[in-house]
Amino acid sequence: MWKYILKRLALLLFTLFLVITVTFFLMQIMPGTPFNNPKLTPEALAQLKTTYGLDLPLWQQYWNYLVGALHGDFGTSFQYQNQSVSMLIGQRLPVSAQLGAQALVVGVIAGLIMGAASARNKNNKIDGTLGIVSTLGISVPSFILGIVLVYLFGFKWPLFPVSGWGDSFSQSILPTIALAVSPAAVTTRFVRSEMIEALSSDYVQLAKAKGLSPKEIVNKHAYRNSMIPVLTLIGPMAAGLLTGSTLIEQIFSIPGIGQQFVLSIPSKDFPVIMGTTVVYAAMLMVMILITDILTAIIDPRVRLQ
Amino acid sequence: MDTWKKVAIGAAAVVVVVGGTRAAGLWGGSGSSNNKNLSFQLPTPIQTLDISKNTDTYSGTIIGNSGANLMRVDKKGDAQPELAKSVKHSKDGLTYTVVLKDNLKWSDGSKLTAKDFVYSWQRIVDPKTASQYAYLASGVQNADKIAGGKGDVDTLGVTAKGNTITFNLERPLPQFEYLLTFSNFMPQKESFVNKEGKKYATTAATSLYSGPYKVEGWNGTNNKFKLVKNDNYWDAKNVKTKQVDVQVVQKPDTAVQLYKQGKIDRVSIANTPELYNANKNNKDVVKAPEATAAYLQYNQTGKNKFLSNAKIREALNLATNRKELTNQVTSGISTAATGLAPEGLAKTTSGEDLAKYVAPGYKFDATAAKKAFEEGLKELGETKATFTITSDADSPAAKSTLDYLQGSWEKALPGLKINQKFVPFSQRIKDSQSQNFDIVVSLWGGDYPEGSTYYDIFKSGASNNNGQFKNEAYNTAVKEAESTNALNPSARDKNYKDAEAALLKDNNFNPLYFRSGYSLQNPDVSGIILNTTGLNQDWKSAVKK
């Protein structure tokens, strides 16, 4: 297994290198410069480019970036004067991570409960209602839900604050719910189908024959096997939360990495765009790796190669 | 089934308890700590507190309220001495001598001296600082040279002796006193900047303040912080508000709702026509002009032969119904343009709005337009003409502006065909500067409350004269305003009026609208000074009943 993990880590580094390269050259196609003020004279613009090293040949800029990145230096933001990219991301990443983790935990737990409830009440009213709810949850994008939540619980019945972060836990409730709905819905559907299959399997029949109560059957036997697909889903779901949170962070004015990513693109803040992309890519790949390892631990039939 | 029931009941209970205690005000939210505190909102996070390097309006609001300068703009729009005891200039306008007030202090209690001003001016023009606003110092001796990397910062025409600062200029600058109010030229303490190094002004704690308030609680990225009264400010006795809470709310409609709940004291409603229409009848509405002008530039390089023809340009200008355009495109938020310099930018010596005084009489006349168009085509030996109008894809008003122009022009001028082209903002700037357009929609915001911030645009050879026309009468008038009459405001007003008339005579450009803003403001709050250039909201004297 260690050999496998090492191999995957090496692959991760190579993929990051590819991501850096592609992003770097894609950004060159973007029109304009970070210095968009039409009032800048050509001399002043040239001076600014020299100061930031943007007048160097492209290959040299690319090389400098790679060397810097290897030393952990991702440059200085153009937009946030004086702030290094590592500092900017370092301060904002924990905010996004907390939001994402909260949403994932809430979503998965809600999904496990709803999925099991659905399976055990197969084809009756509860199952039907949960089916509709989970279909809606998958189809309605989180940002629409976010706006609806703001309207309902921020203004119609003002129970929760609708913007900001870090002053109180209550500020994180609405964005967490908005983000949690999609993972909850996905989990519900997977758990339902897995559990229906498990409940009709031989070992559950045996357990029934042994005289176990339905509660024990579900908790001790069916749940464990239904968990496997959920685990494999956590990686992609976490990725969905990352991208989904960019818009949620805008709606709720949360100072996370997504908000900054969105703001850095129109202002052509190259170092921040690069840094954020690299962080996103790395997080996604680590998440997938962890999922693979977890799957192998839980399901002995899976072998890592 | 029991377990599920328990879980459901438990969850419901949590929601009720959490919601109930929250509603009861037991925890969370900004709440109402002290209603004498002011509470304001910014639509984007602030980026920096670096005085020399900031270019962002909202960061500028925070910097300007936590900093002081030699002069400060009063509620009438005039520059008055602030940290300066006196500001005098020589007869030729080339030397300004400023004497500082006694016993000035930084927020940390240390002495604020004339050297702090010299350092700040040197820092902004220093290429190492890489400030995008270094050009504002243009006209001060050697400023351009130093900014271009061809001179030492010590050669800058700003020097200190005792508590006197001397500014030596290369040419008279009519706007110079306003530069002394600018947040980018506020004093900075060299030893402090060096001590903080790379961290300087990236958080509230790594900044030093000279103004009415100090920033507290900004860690570089958070969306909520406050300004608290600076007891070391020279005029602290006239700062009546102890604390200003500032929060970033990015969604404009959320901000309006927060205003209605009494959580913020002032909010813009001009972001979208929908938001404006939904709130324009609210009793708290106040108007705030922006000194931003939208206009069309005609490519007069010969690239499009029709636009090099004066008759055709005249036809297009006459066929433009600015009032209707403004109503349709901005729902009446903005005002129909009457010339180049927008309303609210500056006042004449007699106190009239400059835009009103210089307005040369742009008018809408479809019949005359049609006639001029036919004459123009005849001169060129053509029967039809085609133009492409370029605009920003990112601006919300862009599509409706082009739709309106296309529809109304094609209707008024038979034989004319208009194509629309949308490009990203930065591409539009690039296309404009490389003359890669027929007609382009441009937006210009003023830097200081004096005409030259607009009239510099269309000087022959100026980099922002994207249509590259030469209008001799215009050049002469503007040049006179900025040299002979640089220190004679009333003669300068007259020059600007002549310049506007020259632009209309040749129809070199087409003014569309002057952008305005509307806000809701808590009627209990008074004393906010609104400026169309420089510090957009001055909270120094703001108080809440």
Image (cartoon, grey):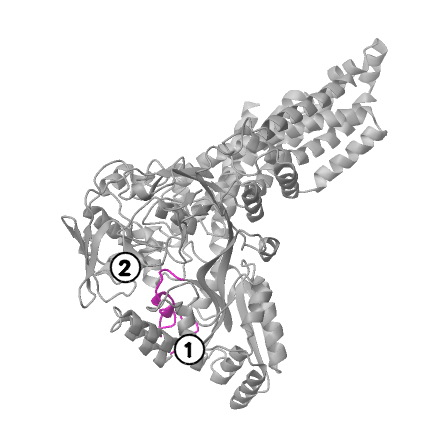
The percent coordinates of residue A58 (x first, y second) are 41, 53
Q: Which residues are magenta?
A: B446-470
Q: Amino acid at mark 2?
A: Glu
Q: Residue beneath label 2, please?
A: B177
Secondary structure of the residue carrying numbered label 1 = helix
Residue B253 to residue A304: above or below: below
**Residue A197 shows up from this direction:** no
- For discs 1 and 2, the disc positioned in front in the rendered view: 2
The chain letter under disc 2 is B
Q: Quadrant of residue B239?
A: top left
Q: Residue beneath label 1, please?
A: B503
**Residue B390 shows up from this direction:** yes
Q: Quadrant of residue B3?
A: top right
The percent coordinates of residue B322 (x first, y second) are 54, 72
Residue A245 to residue B152: above or below: above
Q: In the figure, is residue B476 to the left or right of B46?
A: left
Residue shown at the point (74%, 27%) measured from the top left: A114
Q: CA distance from mark 1 to mark 2?
A: 28 Å
